[in-house]
Structures are given as C-alpha cells and as structure tokens.
Image (cartoon, rainbow, N blue to C red):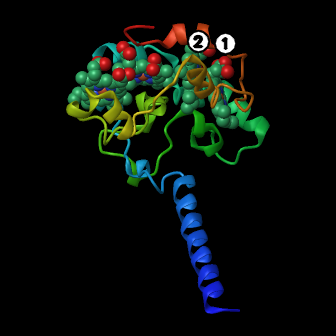
Amino acid sequence: MSHYVQGTIMKYTISAIVLFAFLLLITIPGLAEDKATNKYVGVKTCSMCHKAQFAVWEKSKHADAINALSSPKAAEIAKVKGLKKSAAESEECLSCHIINAKAADVEKNFDPKQGVQCETCHGAGSAYKVMSTMKDKAKAITAGLTAFKDDAAKEKFCKTCHNEKSPTYKEFKFKESWEKIKHAKKT
Ligand code: HEC
Ligand code: HEC
Ligand code: HEC
Ligand code: HEC
C-alpha cells in the first residue's frame, strides 16, 4: 500500500470516529444539554408568583395524591399486590403520586407530600424560576421549563400516569380532565 492510500484511509477513519462521537453526544439525552442539574424547588416557591394557578391546583386531586396512598383502598391494593411495604412507602405507587426525587435533587422548600405538583408537569424549576427568565418563554424553556406543543402533547404527557399501569385506572378523557385542572389564562 502506498503512503498516500494509507494516509487517506487514516483520514477517513479519524473523520468517522469524530462523527460517531458527535452523534453520541447529541443522541444521549442530558449530555449535550444539562437539564439534569436542575433541582425541584417545590409548589411553595412557584406559588409566590403564581397565586391564581396555586389556588386551582390546591383544590385539585393532584394536591392530595399522597393521601390517596394512605386510604383503605390503597391498603387493599397493596395487600392484593403483595407489596412488602405500605403503599405510601412503595416506589411502585409513589412513582405516579409524588415527585420521588433524591435529596440531592431538591431545594429546601420542596415537600414530596405535596403530591403531583407544578414541577411534575412543568419541569424542575431551580434554573427557570427567576423573574427575568420566566418573562422570556424561550429562555425559560432552555432553562428547563417543559414546552407543550399542542393539546396532543399535553394529552400524551397526562397519560404517562393516567394509564393502565394505575391500579385504579379509569378511562382518561383529556378534554374533561383538563377542564377540572386547567389554570391557564387562555385555554
Ligand atoms: C419570581 C416570580 C416567579 C416564580 C418564582 C415562578 N414564576 Fe413562573 N412566571 C413568572 C412570570 C412573571 C411569568 C410570565 C407571565 C405569566 O405568564 O404569568 C411566568 C410564566 C410561567 C409559565 C408560562 C410560560 C408560558 O409563557 O407559557 C409557567 C408554565 C410557569 N411560569 C411556571 C412556573 C413554575 C412551575 C414555577 C415554580 C417552579 C414558577 N413558574 C415560578 C414568574 C414566576
Ligand atoms: C402509572 C401511574 C400510577 C401508579 C404506578 C399508581 N397510581 Fe394510583 N393513581 C394514578 C392515577 C392517574 C390516579 C387517578 C385516576 C385513576 O384512578 O385512574 C390514581 C388514583 C389512585 C387512588 C384513588 C382512586 C380512587 O378511586 O379512590 C388510589 C387509592 C391509588 N391510586 C392507589 C395506588 C396504589 C396503592 C398504587 C401502588 C400499588 C398506585 N396507586 C400506583 C396513577 C398511578
Ligand atoms: C398535571 C399537570 C400540571 C400541574 C400539576 C400544573 N400545571 Fe401548570 N400547566 C399545565 C399545562 C398542560 C398547561 C398548559 C400549557 C400550554 O398551554 O402550553 C399549564 C399552564 C400553566 C401556566 C401558563 C398559564 C397561561 O396563562 O398560559 C402557568 C403560569 C402554570 N401552568 C403554572 C403552574 C403552577 C404554578 C402550578 C402549581 C401550583 C401548575 N402550573 C401545576 C400542566 C400542569
Ligand atoms: C405524575 C403523574 C400524573 C400526571 C403526569 C398527571 N396526573 Fe392527574 N392524577 C394523578 C394522580 C396520582 C391522581 C389521583 C390523586 C388522588 O386521587 O388523590 C390524579 C388525578 C387527576 C384528576 C382527578 C381525578 C379525575 O379523574 O377526575 C384529574 C382531573 C387529573 N388528574 C387530570 C390530569 C391532567 C389533565 C393531566 C395532564 C395535563 C394529568 N392529570 C397529569 C397523577 C398524574
């Protein structure tokens, strides 16, 4: 093999490695954008500025979702499923009823007992909660605020919990359900 051919093969091999590394970086979520470092600040923090939204949420079932796990019905489900711990202590139940985050991923105002909270749906808020960021939607999204493209995207998100994996699942009708918890100015 001539040096020229060998050099060309080398160049192509290096280009391929560089391309592969780049593709890896943009496909592994969290590597290219660092949303993983955002911490949960808790409904108390969000409510300081969003009083109207808080008032709606507070009366919703979502605010009460941890208590559902201490009901006689929950105990019955835990028994039938043969859970080793009570429903309120089982990851199998907590995953949809609270934000079950590690201590390192929450700030001091965060309280898991507040069930399905603002940040369950809007994303961990430590980076976007600042006024100057909140006022600029694009900036807020870059800082971790969840963006919902349209109603279909919202429905898909709701169904990450409102699905057959829920032991008490009832058919989920997005429009009716949204009416019960909506807290936006427009829709
Ligand atoms: C320091 C005050 C402040 C805090 C704290 C705050 N926000 Fe906001 N937020 C605002 C302002 C101001 C806006 C822009 C005007 C508006 O829509 O009310 C906004 C906008 C939003 C929007 C609408 C974005 C859009 O344009 O569609 C969402 C969703 C939101 N905030 C969620 C949260 C959540 C969840 C928290 C807690 C993690 C939080 N905010 C904490 C002030 C705040
Ligand atoms: C996949 C998400 C998910 C998991 C996992 C989950 N739940 Fe739920 N749970 C929900 C949703 C959504 C609702 C409200 C709507 C419904 O019942 O379909 C709910 C409601 C409830 C209710 C109140 C409903 C009623 O009719 O009184 C109880 C009690 C309950 N869950 C117990 C449990 C127990 C116990 C576990 C663990 C074995 C569990 N859940 C695991 C999502 C979940
Ligand atoms: C079950 C999920 C869920 C929970 C819990 C929730 N939100 Fe939302 N919120 C949404 C969705 C979905 C929208 C509509 C977003 C859109 O239209 O782009 C929305 C819209 C908003 C908006 C925009 C309002 C407007 O006028 O456009 C604000 C602000 C907001 N939420 C704040 C909060 C705060 C604060 C809390 C907690 C007290 C909260 N949300 C709890 C899902 C949720
Ligand atoms: C993280 C999981 C989770 C997500 C995401 C979620 N929910 Fe729920 N939702 C629950 C749980 C758990 C309950 C039951 C709470 C209880 O009974 O105490 C519930 C209860 C409800 C209820 C009251 C029960 C009923 O059927 O009338 C409504 C309405 C509701 N959710 C609407 C929504 C909508 C709309 C969305 C999407 C914008 C959504 N939820 C997203 C977990 C979730």
Which residue is rendered at x = 73% and y = 16% of the image?
Answer: 171
Q: Quadrant of ligand 4?
A: top right
User: Which residue is more in the foreground, 123 or 143?
Assistant: 143
User: Which residue is more in the foreground, 9 or 76?
Assistant: 9
Q: Quadrant of the C terminus?
A: top left
How busy is the neighbourhood of tag 2: few (under 14 within 10 Å), some, or many (20 plus)? few
Residue 144 percent location from the top left of the image = 39, 39
Left or right of 164? Residue 29 is: left
Which residue is rendered at x = 59% and y = 39% of the image?
Answer: 95
Say whether residue 150 is visible.
yes
Say whether residue 49 is visible.
no
Left or right of 38? Residue 175 is: right
Label annotation for residue 177: 2
Element at badge 2? helix
Element at badge 1? loop
Q: Is residue 41 above or below residue 7?
A: above
Residue 74 percent location from the top left of the image = 66, 29
Q: Are marks 1 and 2 in contact (CB under 8 Å)?
A: yes
Residue 39 percent location from the top left of the image = 37, 46
Which residue is rendered at x = 57% and y = 60% of the image?
Answer: 24
How far apart are the two marked residues, 1 and 2, measured between alpha carbons?
6 Å
* Residue 6 quadrant: bottom right
Q: Quadrant of the N terminus?
A: bottom right
Distance from mark 2 CB to nearest ligand 4 atom below 8 Å: yes
Residue holding disc 1: 173
* Residue 15 quadrant: bottom right
User: Which residue is more in the foreground, 112 or 153?
Assistant: 153
Q: Is residue 66 above or below residue 150?
A: below
User: Which residue is more in the foreground, 183 or 186?
Assistant: 186
Amino acid under disc 2: Ser
Amino acid under disc 1: Lys
Q: Is residue 183 above or below residue 9?
A: above
